[in-house]
Image: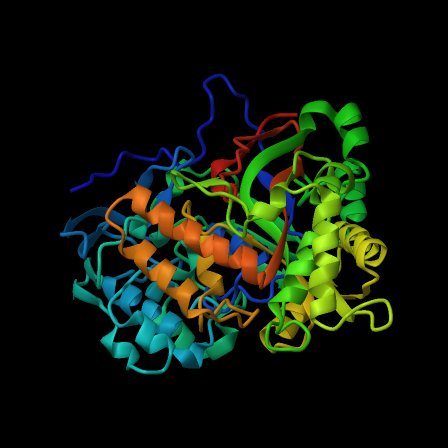
Amino acid sequence: MLSAPGALYAANVPEGTVLSATQELVRNNGSEPASLDPHKVESNVEFSIIRDLFDGLIAIRQDGSVEPRLAQTWENKDNTVWIFHLRPGITWSDGTAITAKDFVWSWQRLVNPKTASPYASYPGNMHIENAAQIAQGKADPQSLGVRALDDNTLEVRLTQPNAAFLPMLAHPSLVPLDPILINRFGDKWTKPEHIVTSGAYKISEWIVNEKIVAVRNARFWDNGATVINKVTYLPISSETADVNRYRAGEIDITNTIPVNQFAQLKKTLGDQVSVTPLLSTYYYQFNTTKPPFNDPRVRRALNMALDKEIIASKVMGQGQRPAWLASQPEIGGVTLSAPDYAAWPHEKRINEAKKLLKEAGFDDAHPLSFNLLYNTMETHQRIAIAVSSMWKKNLGVEAKLQNQEWKTMLDTMHTGNFDAVRYAWIADYDDASTFLNPFRTGDSENTTQYSNPVYDEALRRAAAAGDLSERGRYYQQAETLLGEDVPAIPVYYYVRTHLVKPWVGGFAPDRLGYFLTKDLYIKQH
């Protein structure tokens, strides 16, 4: 049994700090969220806000340890039956009780195919009983291996032990939602006048494409440890506008830093420039069901022809590293190796790429041409220009650049109406499976539609592995297959960059790139 250690995850104001009388924060969110329904979204654009609004059973601290949140204690039997005891007296922001039944209803809604959640496969990947079958429409949502033993006790049954179960439990798709509210208002339940939340903040205002404003939730169980009273999220996709408004004093924390201004801003603003490691991979994914990208030779050739060192160090130049793995070289206690061709001299890779394209029917007389889609942002455009010029110079390939707003691009991806599209994956937890599961056959996040039974089996065996070494071997097998089949081209491993005003205290993004407003405070200035 694990006991709560207190408010170690909340704002920790050093002794002697003089706080501002006005505890208000403005942060740029980078884009207008597609939704604030935790079951309808899939990226940090939405989760950055949702993490402020909703609390889950547990959270993961900076050091990787597990912290009790809505669950105060828990125990398990054989690592397959988990019992969670909710904190006494926890309520929604309207004062009604949060119960174990809310978790059961919410998780059933998540896996229900009618919900069409991008994360419908996630509970199945956790090995929750019947979750995979439900998501595939082969079982009733009521059969999900989760039940309320009473109002304050939740039981979760797994089909096998899962070493990553607790870290996976911290994901925002698993927060409880209020069934009464959603049944009453349907898709409009997230409107400010309807929404109830379980986290530190609740929405008070939402003007689409202008701002979202949230205020303290006085009924949040840990409200006493929160300092910021009001937070405003701005949907500014232009990195230049983001920096300009920061300089004008209108923003306290930017969403990122333009690569072409990074060196100058570092020189002039010094400690206001924040660079932190991030478990995230930037990549271009293919529609593997659409010719010519149903041919792995074409996909592998395009991967080989990129000079990723130049993209990471010159095009970006903020500390990014070239990527040859969908996952990360070091993650969750295992070390993974890149494909053999990653270590080849650049010219050798290009020659092999030309040979592969010719075998697939493309040469100077019949050049490959396709559309390369990215969401509107200066950095994505900059990278796409560099990538397309490398393909043109090295292979004679023409990649026609297209851009769409974030929400539109997500719709395009999920309907399969693309050739190749810019995407990225931020780890949901510290384990290689978070990067590898989206390429499994039938996974709800598998927008490449890649399918390889040998790959699926490697991940199944990794999940069932008895120790870390064995899991690592199966993860390596999966990565080796991705290096051959290339449903997506890894480009670089991220760092997270922000500009942060000197008066913002407590700013420390975690390895997944998130920072919570409840952990921050405003110093007198």
Front position in the image: 227 or 268: 268
Residue 177 position within the rendered picture, expressed as x and y whole percent measured from the top left:
38, 65
Residue pictured at 55% horizontal, 41% vertical: 278
Residue pictured at 73% horizontal, 44% vertical: 346
Image quadrant in which you'd find residue 2: top left
Residue 458 position within the rendered picture, expressed as x and y whole percent measured from the top left:
37, 59
State the scheme by which the image is colored.
Answer: rainbow
From the viewer's perspective, tell me whether residue 329 is left or right of residue 147.
right
Relative to 443, does residue 326 appear above or below in the rendering?
Answer: above
Residue 225 position within the rendered picture, expressed as x and y whole percent measured from the top left:
40, 36
Q: Is residue 184 visible?
A: no
Q: Farthest top residue?
A: 16
From the viewer's perspective, tell me whether residue 484 is left or right of residue 146.
right
Image quadrant in which you'd find residue 298: bottom right
Relative to 35, does residue 275 appear above or below in the rendering?
Answer: above
Front position in the image: 57 or 60: 60
- Quarter of the image with the N terminus is top left
Residue 437 position within the rendered picture, expressed as x and y whole percent measured from the top left:
44, 60
Q: Is residue 108 visible?
A: yes
From the viewer's perspective, tell me whether residue 204 is left or right of residue 497.
left
- Quarter of the image with the C terminus is top right
Label count reads 0
From the viewer's perspective, tell me whether residue 497 is left or right of residue 191.
right
Residue pictured at 63% horizontal, 33% vertical: 275
Relative to 499, does residue 341 appear above or below in the rendering?
Answer: below
Front position in the image: 334 or 484: 484
